Image: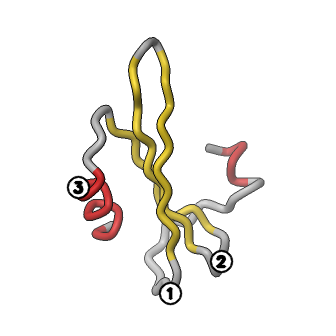
Amino acid sequence: MKKFEKKLPISTEKKERNIVAIDETVVKANRKKYYVFSAVDVERNELILMRVYTTRNYITAILKLLRE
């Protein structure tokens, strides 16, 4: 995580956020697919959170991201 902090600050504190971008990326490793969901505060250019799942369930992932 340290190497990413220089390019995209990582925020751990709760803040009011007006614009949040959510992204899904598929990563393949050892013949398996992993689904990486991330959320970024667009105004502050901060990574809010990142989660990795072994199955793709878009609605569940989005709800989890929004609750945190």
* Residue 62 placement: quadrant: bottom left
Image height check: is 48 above or below 31? below
Q: Position of residue 19 (x, y in %)?
A: 52, 81
Amino acid bearing label 2: Arg
Q: CA distance from mark 3 to mark 2?
A: 26 Å
Where is the N terminus found, in terms of image quarters? Answer: top right
Other residues around mark 3 within 10 Å, as few (<14) / some (14–19) / many (≥20) = few
Circle on res. 44: 2
Other residues around mark 2 within 10 Å, as few (<14) / some (14–19) / many (≥20) = few
Q: Position of residue 4 (x, y in %)?
A: 69, 48
Q: Position of residue 30 (x, y in %)?
A: 46, 12
Residue under label 3: 60
Image height check: is 56 above or below 45? above
Q: Residue at x 69, y 53 (%)?
A: 5
Circle on res. 18: 1
Q: Disc 2 vs disc 1: which is toward the camera?
A: 1
Image height check: is 62 above or below 33? below
The reply to whether discs 3 and 2 touch (Cβ–Cβ < 8 Å) is no
Q: Residue at x 45, y 43 (%)?
A: 36
